[in-house]
Image (cartoon, coloured by chain):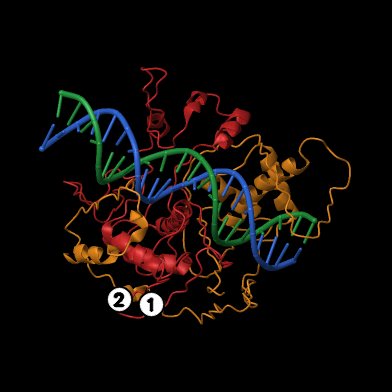
Chain colours: A red, B orange, C blue, D green
Amino acid sequence: MKVHQLARGFWEQQEPLLSLGCKRLRPLAPKLTDTTTTVSSFDLKSFIRPDSGPRKLGNGPSNDNRHSPPVETHPGGTRWNPTQEQIGILEMLYRGGMRTPNAQQIEQITEQLGKFGKIEGKNVFYWFQNHKARERQRQKRFGHCPRKSAPITPITLDTRVEIIMEREEGSPYKRKYRSWSFEEEEISRSSSKEDENRTLELFPLHPESR
Amino acid sequence: MKVHQLARGFWEQQEPLLSLGCKRLRPLAPKLTDTTTTVSSFDLKSFIRPDSGPRKLGNGPSNDNRHSPPVETHPGGTRWNPTQEQIGILEMLYRGGMRTPNAQQIEQITEQLGKFGKIEGKNVFYWFQNHKARERQRQKRFGHCPRKSAPITPITLDTRVEIIMEREEGSPYKRKYRSWSFEEEEISRSSSKEDENRTLELFPLHPESR
DNA sequence: GCAAATTAATGATTTATTCAAG
DNA sequence: CTTGAATAAATCATTAATTTGC
């Protein structure tokens, strides 16, 4: 099944090293667990990502409390780690029928969720993508969901939530444009109530070998 | 502050998805971290888009008009229409080995190509994506066995030729982060003289038509 | 009880496929 | 048909819950 990437890696020959990792049977394989050599426990990633800098987290120049950082901020966070509140709201929206929020919606959602923790637009976007895909996946894997009735339960929080809903797999054919912005590493996730143009997030990207 | 807990319980009370039958599923317990988030002010109202034009909601079983919405002439125009110079440069870069430029590169490329015509970062990104994919596609289709016969296969029906093979010659599969930015419709590219101005493209997203 | 090892879950990217403008 | 644009599927990578051994 996964022959795919093996083959690819083979042809590629751009990554000659690392080829020993052919035993990739489970993606879950942790960093190493190498069985071939007991010594080479040498974390490639450490080298690959010395970028402690670029990925600043304590970005907030405004609120820089460098003493006793509470558990609040993700420790050296790399990826978004949603809080319960955030997940809750997202699921709520999802159940409400939202599948692929557009830029506006994402912006708003991000803004709201930002009250509960650091978050960026792309996190929201990815969350929906993944959630949708994985629900579909489960559905397929376990066959059918026993209790699938109640197509949608319009969330009634305090007002009518009027979100477009769309068939689960009916191929929505809904096209829209999304914003892109390419930036250098940067930060700026401070609250911003005016949305002018915020943009950018950053990124470490490799110097593009080749 | 307590609210979140309660709220959480409320939301998850019906979450069949994660606990379908199989015992294998370990619903990761809540991570509940801070009790400090006193920001329980999540106004859902904000989520409900005040505007959100008329959803036409043709959800009726009637003919699904999968095609696109009305005219919707975008002020800025339609889609990117590359000029010869742009294409030339892009192909040059492509031949040079570039496959998946990172944010920085895209930024620079965009900037340069901007001298020849309107263009945005995403156009560059998509171009590489598509070019790569289509080269691969052609490779597969006519891959080995260079048949001189006309490639034209006026297939009438929808028979897509399923090609199984896949071989490609080089794509590093580098991981990188990409920037996202969600904006409202707006069009303001221009500035092609300065190169300091960060890109920040925005996009016309369709008003969620359907 | 705790910390390393496992492993399920899931965030983030890349690739494949699809839709539709020109 | 060609190809820009967008989405879905597949994959990679990291986090945290659980298990395990002390």
Q: Which residue shows up at 40% across the image and 33% down it? A: A29
Among the 4 quarters of the image, the one containing residue B139: top right
Q: Quadrant of the N terminus of chain B?
A: bottom left
User: Neighbour class for label 1 at 10 Å: few (<14), some, many (≥20)?
Assistant: some
At horizontal 30% and vertical 76% (from top left) the residue drawn is: A157
Instruction: Decide if residue B5 is on the left or right side of residue D14.
Output: left
> Which of the 4 image quadrants contains residue A34?
top left
Disc 2 packing (10 Å; few <14; some 14–19; many ≥20): few
Left or right of A127 on screen, residue A67: left
Numbered disc 2: secondary structure: loop
- Residue B172 in view (yes/no): no
Q: Which residue is mark 2?
A: A157
Is residue A79 visible in the rendered structure shown here? yes
Count of number-bearing discs: 2
Amino acid at dot 1: Val
A65 is higher (above) or lower (below) than A2: below
Q: Are marks 2 and 1 in contact (CB under 8 Å)?
A: yes
Residue at numbered disc 1: A161
Residue B50 vertical position relative to residue B12 in the rendered view, above or below: below
Q: Residue B94, position in %: x, y?
A: 67, 42
- Residue A185 percent coordinates (x, y): 43, 47
From the image, which quarter does the C terminus of chain B lie in? bottom right
